Each structure stands twice: as structure tokens, then as C-alpha cells.
Amino acid sequence: MPVSKPVSKPMSKPVPEPRPEPVRTRTTIRPQRLPLLAATAATAALVVASLFVGGYDISLRTLLDDPDALDMFLISRVPRTLALILSAAAMGVCGVFMQMLVQNRIVEPTTTGASEWAALGILLLALFAPAAPVLVRMGAASAFAFAGTMAFLGVLRRVRLRSSVVVPLAGIMLGSVVSALTLYLASGADLLQMLTTWRSGGFSGTVRGQYEPLWVVGLIVAALYLAADRFTIAGLGKDVATNLGLRHERIMLIGVSMVALATGVTTIVVGFVPFLGLVVPNLVSLLRGDDVRANLPWVVIGSVALMILCDLIGRVVVFPLEIPASVILGAVGATLFIGMILRQRRTLHG
Amino acid sequence: MRPLRLRKTAITTAAVTAAALVLGACSGPGGDGDGKAADAQSRTVDTADGTVDVPFKPVRVAALDNTSFATLKAFGVTPVAAPKSLLPKTGYEDWVKDEKVADAGGHREPLFEAVNEAEPGLTIGGYRFAEHTGTLNKIAKTIDVSPDDEAEGGYVASPKKQTRTLGAIFGQEAKAAELVAALDASAEAAGRATNGESVFLGVASAGRIDNGASRIGRLMAPLSLKNVLDPAGQDSTSVHNDSGLAPETIAQLNPDWMILFDRDAAVGKGDNTAAKALVDGQQAWAKTTFRTKDQIVHLAPDFYLTEGIQAYTEAFGQVAGAFAAKS
């Protein structure tokens, strides 16, 4: 197989370059796809690890011999792994779209305040309708995440100075105000403990019958992928998008609703997933440029790999107890994030 | 600002205490009503902060430590201030409704002004309010005699000491001895009923069940039980309690019994139905011994807020009853 083209691409390019003509060889695998395949294989290995690491004795042999092990595999391991994949994909892809819609690289649902609003929704429901079914709780969380994102966009519209730092700062500030309100209410109602448990929730309690709502999130990821080009155009700004015949307001609304729904559902099922939507999309566009649709598979794979890795670490280090994946992700994500910012500074200042 | 307020507090406290001592002869609001004059004697008691002189039979008491509420009630004491949000849902309606009982706020945000205005002669602090002892001491003498894991003789010995100390302060030694004897009898019965079985100490919070050893591991001392998550010793104070536990891990360890502490009940409807549904709905536990044999002890829903000598007496009684029924 001739390797005619260099596999690596320039570090960063603002405009997606036209795709190279497909190199037709007798094999069906094109060389450009090789890195993606390798990344997919590595992620698949992590998925397999996630299926076979845990408190219950499950191995390939017991899976075949022992019906109890098979039961537990289906009750606990498969749902947990699916939950990891779905929520990671959702948070990664939501990060990409928030960054497109706001035209800023440092936003994602946890820095636009959407997650904090979802938490407020959950707390209010715990206060006024503690026995509400899970669908209602998801609706409330998503509605609050939507309201929060709209509030963020509203504030953004009034902010004249849209530097790359001001935008996420506005989001973090709004989120902190909402979070303070949530804490105040929780503290008054003795729900702080519940809020903490739930926020750092993680995947330890994820079992069959509990993760299924995340399939909705999977659908949203698919829908966002199909509509990726429209969002790319929307991401060029209102004027350009309108000139290109796009109903900018409507596409914004649809995008925000989808992101809010995904955030709300994820928050209800597995709690906060910090930094994922920030770090992975940025790393991907740093390495591959800004072709949104072509980058999405990379974002999904990268998010899933990072999420599962963090969860696996959390499962192993204090066995048989666990450390929530969000805690590990917070530490890993913060490190990557700071590294990224330092790198950007260096390129900015020559 | 502070010295002024302090001086004012000191003066009013002194004046009120003096007045209370005189009026105490009639029968103070929290007096034992036997018509005896509360004398000016003081008692020296052993607290978490060393030995302290406290007034004997104080009439105006701020009760902040929730582990002492039931004991104060048993002594016939009605406090002048109490954290109303920390009062158990049942049994304390009279304190909640009584406007003469000031609301001291919660431990995260104590209403010091309200405590100050209630003009207590003695504050029973500690436990959740332990970090506020310094501030409270500026308002009135504050003692911390609450149960403590580090106490001599282990945790279960310490509510006994707390009860005896309170008994000495309020001149209720006989009643205190009665409460201590009840705990001893209950703990001993539970010790006899248990016979080396393995147990999972669970805590239900925010709709999931986690390792509750840090909170209810205290129950283990007099029991002959083995904590499945801590086979080496029973006094687990691992920092990883409450951080996450997969249901499959408990299924693998397959404990004979589960003792469940329901934190959700303290803020929810106040019964155990949600926690029961949580345990029954856990598919991963369908084949465990504790589920198939229904060997689950649900601690009282308000255990989260009581946690005093009476609560432990009741808990040991529950354990003894449940184990006896299954043996």
C-alpha cells in the first residue's frame, strides 16, 4: 500500500481545506483513515477493560460457565460502559456545538452555567416534588439547563467585549451565581448532603434500569452530527450565516435546545461531567483544524476514551470502593486545560 | 463593636441569671417543678475542651447538640434556644411550636443573634456545632459533652458519659442512670443475638446506597458482626466512605445482613419506604443472602437527627429483634 500523503496535518488552520481526492487503491482502507482506526481500536480496548473491571468476578470463562456472572455482566457492566460511552459522547459533542454557537473555544455546558442550572432544577424538584418520576426530573433539569443557556446567550448579546476570556468568564460567573442560590436553598433545607452525593455522582451506581435515559442523549449526538454543517455555518456568525441563507436564530435555538436536553439528561443520570466538552474538542481542533463534521468522530472517540480511562482509574485505586469519575476527570481535565492555555499563550506571544 | 456587645451580653446574662435564680424558686420554664430553689452551686464537668465549671440546674439552656435533645426532654428541660431545623420530625412538636424556644438556625449557618437574645445560662453545644464553640462561649458558657469516636472506651461508651454528665448538671442522676442501663441492656442483647455474621453497613443518600461505615460503624462495637467492606477491623474511618460503591461489589461480597441508615428519610417524607424500594429494586442484589432472606435492618428514619443514647438503645433493640427473629 503506497503511503503517498503525509498522515499528520498542519497544527491549526482556520479554514477547512478541501478534502483531498480519495486515493483509490485495491484495499478499502484509505491511509487517511488509519489514525482514526487506531484511535478507535485503542478506545475499544478501553471499552473491553471497562467491561471486565469491577467488584464482581467476571472473566471470559465465568461469562460462559456461570449464569450469575452473565447476569451481573448484563445488570452492571454493560449498562455502566454504555452510560460512560453515551454521556462522554454527549458532553464532548455538546462542547463542540457550544463552542461553535458562541464562537468561543473555552465554553462547554459546565462553563456556560448549564450544568449549574440543571442542578438548581433538580434541587427545586427535590424540595417541592421529591417523589417526581425520573422523566419529570429530566424534563426539569433540561428546562433549567435551557433557561440557563439562554440567559447566558442573552448576557453575551449585551456584552460588547467578546474576548475569548470574557465569554467563558461570563458563563462561569452566571453559573456561580446560580450555584450559590442552589447551595443556599440546599443548606436551608438540609439537602446539602444529597446535593454533594448527587453532584459527584459518577457511574458507581449505574445499573440496568437506570442508565437507559442516556439513549436520548445518543440520539441527540447523532442528530447534531447530521446537522453539523449547518452549525458550522452558524458558527461563522449571524451575518455570514444569514447571507448564506441560514435562519440563524432558528438554528441557534435548535442547537441550544439539543445541548440543554443532553446536559439535563446527563446531569440527572450521572451527575456533573466537568471539562470533557472543553478539553477534548480543543485538543482535536488543535491537532486537526476546524472541520467540525470531520472532527466529530475524533471528539466522540477522544471523549469516550478519556471518560472510560478516568472511570477505570476511579474503580481501581481504592478498590473495592470507588472514586467518582468526575473527580478524576476534574483533575486530569484541569491539567490538560491549563497546559492548553499555556500553549496558546506561547503561540500568541510568538 | 465586639467588646461593647460582649459587655452588654455579660451584663444582661448576669442580670437574667440573677433574676432566674430568684424566680427559679417559683418554677422556671425548664425547671423540674419540684419547688426546690435552684441553688447557686456550680458543678465541674469533663468536656471535650477539658474540665469546666457550669451552673448547677441551669434554667435557661440553649440546646444545640442534637444527640442530647432526647435526654434533655427526659429530664424535663425545655430549652430557650434550639436549632429547629435539626429537631427530629416527631416528638419535638412542642419545641417547634413554642415561641419561647428561639430558633438557633442550623450548624452551617447558626443564628447567633437569636441565641444571644434567648439569654441562655448554659449552652449545650458540640457535635454538629463543635466548630462554633468559641463564638457560642462569648454568649454563654458552652460545653461540648457530645459523643465522640475518640472517646475513652469507644464511641458507644461516650453517649453514656454524656448522659451521666448531663444528669449531674441537671440534678437528674437517677434518670441518667436509667438511660445508661437501658443502653447497656440493649447493646448486650444485640451482642448476644449476633453471632459472627457478615454485614454491610449501608447509607441511602440521593437515591443510591453507599458505604455508611463512617456514620454507623459505631454500632458495631458491642455486636458480633463482621463488616464485609472492612474485614480487618471494625473501626473504619476510611476517607473513601460515601465516595462510591458499585452494587455489584456488594453482590460479590454477599453479606448475610445489611444495616441501612437512611439519610434521605431525614429530609424526605420521614419514613423508610424510599430506602426499602431502593434495596428491593436493586437487580444486582437479587441473589444476595440479605435480600433473599430479608435480613435487612432499617434504622429509624430520624436516626440521622437523633443519634443520642436513646437512638442507639433503639437501634440495638432493632438489631437484637431482627437477628433473634431469623435465628
Image (cartoon, coloured by chain):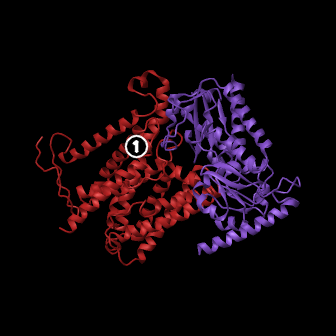
Asked whether residue B139 is in view, the answer is yes
Residue B87 spot, x, y in % from top left: 71, 53
Residue B226 spot, x, y in % from top left: 56, 28
Query: Which of the pair B281/A250 is nearer the observer?
Result: B281
Asked whether residue B280 is in view, the answer is no
Q: Is B221 situated left or right of B252 in this image?
A: right
Question: In percent of the image, x 31 and y 69: which residue is there?
Answer: A236
Query: Which of the pair B315/A96 is nearer the observer?
Result: B315
Quarter of the C terminus of chain A within the rendering: bottom left
- Chain drawn in red: A
Quarter of the N terminus of chain A within the rendering: top left
The answer for which chain carries disc 1 is: A
Q: How dense is the environment of label 1, judged by Cα within 10 Å: few (below 14), some, or many (20 and up)?
A: many
- Chain drawn in purple: B
Query: Which of the pair B72/A104 is nearer the observer?
Result: B72
Q: Which residue is mark 1?
A: A311
Residue B222 spot, x, y in % from top left: 64, 31
